[in-house]
Image (cartoon, rainbow, N blue to C red):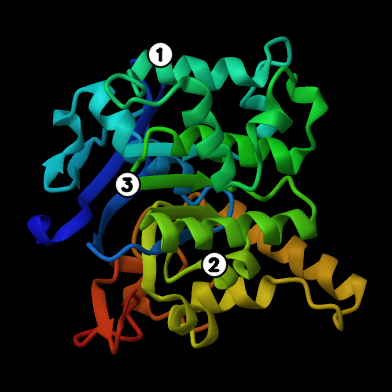
Amino acid sequence: MVNNSLLVLNRVTKVFQIGTLLSKVRIYAVRDVTLEIGKKPVVFTLVGESGSGKTTLANILLGVIKPTEGYVSLLGKNIESYKKSEFIKLVQPIFQNPYETFNPLKKVEVYFRSVIHRLGIANGSGRTAERIIDEALHSVALSWEEVRGKYPHEFSGGQLQRLSIARALMVNPVLLLADEPVSMLDASLRVFVLNLFRKLKEERQLYIVYITHDLATAYYLSDHIAVMLRGSIVEIGPAEKVLLSPLHPYTVLLKESVPNPHRKRGEWLSFQAREERALEIEEYAEQGCKFALRCPHVKDVCRREMPPDTVVEDAVVKCWLYAKNP
């Protein structure tokens, strides 16, 4: 499996311990996650509510934190085996807030020159730093002339996010990991950046792991989607299949929770309040399916045991409704 894949996560679990020496509580931020991204460039999306484990999993993929159990393999090699300088050239992050990416007291070009110098990008290439920067900026519909000599506050949020992407592209990575990259942009700029990701996938043959809570952008951009709930992937498959014909009751809930312009404001606020309360209660459910307290189809077995992964056509779902021996 590893040799035929770009990225493999094998039973990845991350446990955090909180409390004192005498009273420690184990928190499963990510639990037993297994997934694979093949050799064909795709946009693979992790979607779920706040606290579902998406960002923890992203930090594991970036090598920022190590899994408690399991491993992550990139191009057939455990990511912990890479030198830092090697790994940076393969995987680049795009973060949520473009205003936090750049120091307001430094000119933007300083960051680009720093990457070139630190990673030796220009060495032996026959290209000047300015040409390398201009090529990266051109990929995101900007130019060296527009950027040279300017500070971050002289750019819009959308331009700063494109600058973040350009900086990541300078190292020619194979994988971009984009964590909520458009959540702070207005609607028109969101579409522009999402289309940019599509273009980069096709033209540069880039793999993109897109992390979001927004089902609308997930549907617009994604090839495949994995739905996370309290650290576990509960459904995974082609984007259209998962979002238009969801199998897991949690995925159905996510789809129904998208604001409906025809739903009255009072009904929407009541719906939100019920879900927030259910999430608070769910935090204390340590046995069985983590959705059991909110599921309209709950069975006794759901409260006792975690459901297995079950293949249903071209999707995989973690739910007793589809298990062969419930």
Mark 2, Cα crowd under 10 Å, few <14 / some 14-19 / many 20+, is many
Outermost residue toward the right in this view: 265
Which residue carries the number 2 mark?
221
Closer-to-camera residue (245/269): 245
Per the model, the C-alpha gap separating discs 1 and 3 is 20 Å
Which residue lies at the image location 47% right of the left edge and 30% below the top edge? 132
Residue 80's x, y, as percent?
18, 30
Q: Say left or right for 231 vs 281.
A: left
Per the model, the C-alpha gap separating discs 2 and 1 is 34 Å
Which residue lies at the image location 60% right of the left edge and 59% below the top edge? 194
From the viewer's perspective, is the residue at label 2 or at label 3 nearer? 3
Q: Secondary structure at mark 3?
A: loop
Which residue carries the number 1 mark?
117
From the viewer's perspective, is the residue at label 2 or at label 1 nearer? 1
| Circle 2/circle 3 CB separation < 8 Å | no
Q: Secondary structure at mark 1?
A: helix
Badge 1 or badge 3: first in the primary sequence: 1
Mark 3, Cα crowd under 10 Å, few <14 / some 14-19 / many 20+, is many
Outermost residue toward the front in this view: 126
Per the model, the C-alpha gap separating discs 2 and 3 is 18 Å
Q: Secondary structure at mark 2?
A: helix
Which residue carries the number 3 mark?
174
Q: Please state, as top left, top right, bottom left or bottom right, where the N terminus lies in the image.
A: bottom left
Q: Please state, as top left, top right, bottom left or bottom right, where the C terminus lies in the image.
A: bottom left
